[in-house]
Image (cartoon, rainbow, N blue to C red):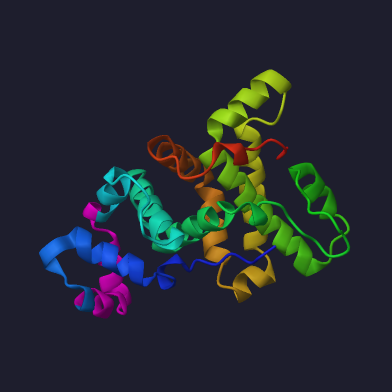
Amino acid sequence: MRMIQANCRIQFTAEDISFISDVLGGRYNQGFVVDLLSDAEARDLILDDVALYRALLERGGCLKVSAHFYFYVLVRHVLLQAGVDDRAMTDYVAEVLAEFSGTEHINAFVPGRDEPLEYCVDMMEALQSADDSTRFMLRAHLGNHSLFFAGVFPSRIRSRAERKGAPNLEYYERLGQLNYRVASDHRLARHYDLAPIYASLSDQFHITRKALNDLADRVLFIDEDQGPNSSN
């Protein structure tokens, strides 16, 4: 398991800068965009420009932007529309999507086990025998895992709950809220400056989940085959 940080905004690429310059047209040339992005306040104002959000939604084909830029701009705007104006939390959620959109980060790896933990119930069971730092990592991963699947694949979760009696969306919400809350109280959350973010995600899990549902309805940014076929 990799410790996910709220750091999308410091991982932008030359392609992202070129995209910003292209979309915003005559307002900024590429050199000026580079200078502006080095200033945190100016950078955040640029990223809040609705023209970037619309361009990501409307331009077809393969966009030449990084996953960090793509997810940050989209998540920022759907959360703003939901009444959540928290850039640090947005940054974290965007990084969760960027990480989990690659299948290698979906499952949990813990010391002493050769195989990754694929099921939530197995991750919860592993908490009982894990050391302190591994328990923290598992709590954070369970929060991220729950948010990702409930946010991106709600229809798949509903279908499996109805057909097979698998966990429903309410289960994922409770699991995510609980584990983010416990993780927020851990000393390592304070060490990594993640305590406020975990606390906010616990408090606003439902709102965040619904905002991601709206985003998933608008853009198919993750392969449906990655859906929760084994995440109970």
Where on the picture, by quarter, is residue 216? top left
Q: Is residue 58 above or below residue 162?
A: below
The residue most toward the front is 61
Q: Position of residue 8 (x, y in %)?
A: 45, 66
> Which quadrant: the C terminus?
top right
On screen, residue 109 versus residue 183, left or right, reads right
- The rendered magenta stretch, by its main secondary structure, is classed as helix
Left or right of 231, for residue 214: left
Which residue lies at the image location 76% right of the left edge and 43% below the top edge?
A: 119
Identify the image quadrant of residue 25: bottom left
Q: In the rendered structure, does residue 48 fall within the stretch colored magenta?
A: yes
**What is the count of numbered marks?**
0
Q: Is residue 95 magenta?
A: no
Q: Decide if residue 186 is on the left or right side of residue 42.
A: right
Residue 165: image location, x then y, percent: 72, 23
Where residue 29 appears, as percent x and y from the top left, is 17, 72
Considering every residue shown, the one lying at the far left of the view is 26
Front position in the image: 70 or 184: 70
Q: Which residues are magenta?
A: 32-51
The residue drawn where x is 55% and y is 72% is 193
Classify 222 as above or below 134: above
Residue 174 in the image: above or below residue 17: above
**Given the current orientation, which residue lies at the most extreme top position?**
163
Could you say where residue 118 lies in the image, as x and y percent from the top left?
A: 75, 46
